[in-house]
């Protein structure tokens, strides 16, 4: 496996940054609500909820918003939530494979918006199963590089917790596990006194595509447009960006 499977939005003007920050908060809140609905509002007995809250806190979502989301999802506020998880498949510029994960209360709206964004940004929808084989579902624990933390430190912490590998992503490390071992790996990280940013199941590419600079720009533009959609929770690609291409992208931004 190589390259990131999910892409963050690039820096733009303050108004756009603020808008995307609000959208990011809303999506993190959705994750908390769904986790609380499925597994209950007790964090101690619901590791998925604990991880959703951890990610929200790391992204500076206010505690009051988090608490309200737990109560809504757990049925403690008298409100009801009804989200469906839908996965769309498609191709971006240059044949880059895309998995688009939606969490929505309106399936028809989500489908229409994703199709429109794809067609306007050089992408095309694909039949179910025609893209997914390029990806494997894995547990991913993200850890920032802090206080001199090394790859060996992380590897030692998770060696007996079902970890498959530790990847240095430049700004941090990713611990890759089978999804069933995600909680164990996260606990091992915590017990070793290492702070983690997020622990969640993701789709990682098993076959990667390395585009040229122009192709990478187009794919990034498509992913950003998809991530701006309220119903889209995550976008996974099999685009591989080696360091030199990443540097060229940053210079051209």
Image (cartoon, grey):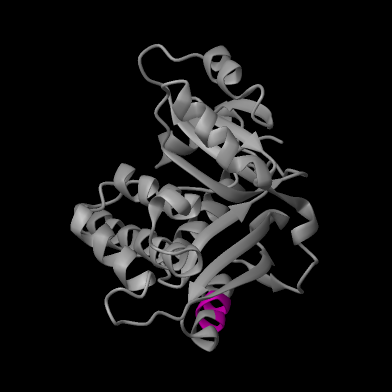
| Residue 115: quadrant of the picture | bottom right
Vertical relation: 231 (above or below) 183 = below
What is the number of callouts on the image?
A: 0
| Residue 124: quadrant of the picture | bottom right
Q: Residue at x 43, y 70 (%)?
A: 229
Q: Nearer the viewer, residue 180 or 145?
A: 180
Q: Residue at x 23, y 61 (%)?
A: 65
Predominant SS along the magenta part: helix
Q: Answer with left or right where residue 7 lies relative to residue 165.
A: left
Q: Answer with left or right where residue 130 lies relative to residue 54.
A: right
Which quadrant would the N terminus be assigned to in this image?
Answer: top right
Outermost residue, bottom direction? 108
Expressed as whole percent of the image width and height from the top left, the position of residue 20 reads 31, 59
Expressed as whole percent of the image width and height from the top left, the position of residue 77 reads 27, 76
Which quadrant would the C terminus be assigned to in this image?
Answer: top left
Expressed as whole percent of the image width and height from the top left, the position of residue 75 reads 36, 75
Q: Residue at x 51, y 52 (%)?
A: 220
**Residue 112 included in the magenta stretch of the image:** yes
Q: Nearer the viewer, residue 204 or 217?
A: 204
Q: What are the residue bounds of the magenta stretch?
A: 111-116
Q: Residue at x 44, y 47 (%)?
A: 51
**Residue 198 in view:** yes
| Residue 193: quadrant of the picture | top left
Expressed as whole percent of the image width and height from the top left, the position of residue 92 reads 64, 60
**Residue 35 included in the magenta stretch of the image:** no
């Amino acid at each position: 496996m190589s390259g990131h499977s999910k892409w963050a939005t690039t820096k733009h003007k303050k108004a756009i940054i603020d808008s995307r920050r609000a959208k990011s908060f809303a999506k993190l809140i959705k994750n908390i609500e769904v986790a609380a609905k499925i597994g209950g509002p007790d964090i101690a007995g619901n590791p998925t909820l604990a991880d959703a809250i951890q990610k929200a806190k790391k992204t500076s979502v206010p505690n009051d918003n988090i608490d309200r989301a737990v109560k809504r999802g757990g049925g403690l506020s008298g409100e009801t939530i009804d989200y469906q998880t839908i996965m769309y498949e498609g191709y971006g510029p240059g044949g880059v494979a895309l998995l688009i994960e939606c969490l929505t209360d309106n399936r028809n709206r989500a489908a229409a918006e994703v199709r429109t964004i794809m067609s306007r940004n050089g992408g095309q929808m694909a039949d179910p199963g025609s893209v997914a084989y390029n990806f494997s579902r894995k547990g991913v624990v993200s850890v920032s590089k802090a206080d001199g933390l090394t790859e060996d430190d992380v590897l030692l912490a998770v060696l007996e917790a079902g970890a498959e590998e530790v990847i240095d992503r430049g700004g941090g490390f990713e611990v890759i596990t089978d999804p069933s071992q995600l909680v164990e790996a996260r606990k091992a990280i915590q017990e070793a006194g290492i702070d983690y940013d997020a622990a969640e199941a993701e789709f990682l590419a098993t076959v990667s595509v390395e585009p040229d600079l122009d192709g990478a720009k187009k794919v990034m533009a498509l992913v950003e447009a998809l991530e701006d959609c309220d119903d889209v929770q995550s976008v996974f690609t099999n685009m591989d960006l080696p360091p030199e291409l990443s540097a060229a992208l940053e210079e051209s931004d």
